[in-house]
């Protein structure tokens, strides 16, 4: 069973799409491992998206993702990382496959409704960002 990190971005939380989006992932065979509603500070968003620092869209991305709460969750399934990326669709909602979450709920390339870990290598670190192990 693989784990991946998924979060519903502020643009979708503000439009009351949390239930609809979670229904999509549950109906696609993902099990919820953990869940939290949290508003990222700018510094937190910058840390999470540090690999994009310096890119032309970085400031817009940080502004958007810290503009309100996100709903972050750990999702579990065989091949969770790859299968969730498929369900989420391409970064730009206009280019995302019909029926994908971003195609149906994304507003534009920045406000594209959700985030999903891009690789089994990065998923554990992204999970730890939202759900630090306490022991
Ligand atoms: N992004 C953007 N403009 C771009 C590319 C990306 O605003 O031209 C934003 C978008 O919200 C995206 C996030 O930056 O989800 C991270 O970019 P990445 O290329 O990692 O896309 P993802 O992995 O989310 O599909
Ligand atoms: Mg990415």
Image: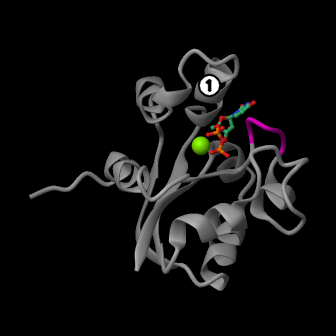
Q: Quadrant of the N terminus?
A: bottom left
Label 1 belongs to which residue?
A: 63
- What percent of the width, then of the height, locates residue 75? 48, 70
**Relative to 82, is 94 above or below?**
above
Residue at the spot 53% in from the left edge and 64% down from the top edge:
81
Q: Quadrant of ligand 2?
A: top right
Foreground: 48 or 124? 124
Camera-side residue: 111 or 78? Answer: 78
Q: Tell me: residue 56, above or below residue 72.
A: above
The magenta segment is: 107-111
> Does residue 28 appear left or right of residue 75 in this picture?
right
Which image quarter holds the C terminus? bottom left
In the displayed structure, 71 sits above or below 94; it is: below
**Outermost residue toward the left in this view:** 135
Q: Nearer the viewer, residue 83 or 94?
A: 83
- The crowding category of the residue bearing disc 1, from other C-alpha atoms within 10 Å (few below 14, some 14 to 19, many at least 20), is some
Q: Is residue 56 above or below residue 35?
A: above
Which residue shows up at 63% across the image and 19% down it? 55
Residue positioned 53% across, 20% down in the render: 53
Give how far across and how far down residue 78 sits, in percent. 49, 80
What residue do we see at 71% from left, 44% from top? 11
Q: Provide the secondary structure element on which disc 1 rests.
A: helix
Q: Is residue 36 magenta?
A: no
By secondary structure, the bulk of the magenta-drawn segment is best described as: loop
In which quarter of the view is residue 124 placed? Answer: bottom left
Judging depth in this view, the residue of 70 and 121 nearest the camera is: 121
Where residue 44 appears, x then y in whole percent? Answer: 41, 31
């Amino acid at each position: 069973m693989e784990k991946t990190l998924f979060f519903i971005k502020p643009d979708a939380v503000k439009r009351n799409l949390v239930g609809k989006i979670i229904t999509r992932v549950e109906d696609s065979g993902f099990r919820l491992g953990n869940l939290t509603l949290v508003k990222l500070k700018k510094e937190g968003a910058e840390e999470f998206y540090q690999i994009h620092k310096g890119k032309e869209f970085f400031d817009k991305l940080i502004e958007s993702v810290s503009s309100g709460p996100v709903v972050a969750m750990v999702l579990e399934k065989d091949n969770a990382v790859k299968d969730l990326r498929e369900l989420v669709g391409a970064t730009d909602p206009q280019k995302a496959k019909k029926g994908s979450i971003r195609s149906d709920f994304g507003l534009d390339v920045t406000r594209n409704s959700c985030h999903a870990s891009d690789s089994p290598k990065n998923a554990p670190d992204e999970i730890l960002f939202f759900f630090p192990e306490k022991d």
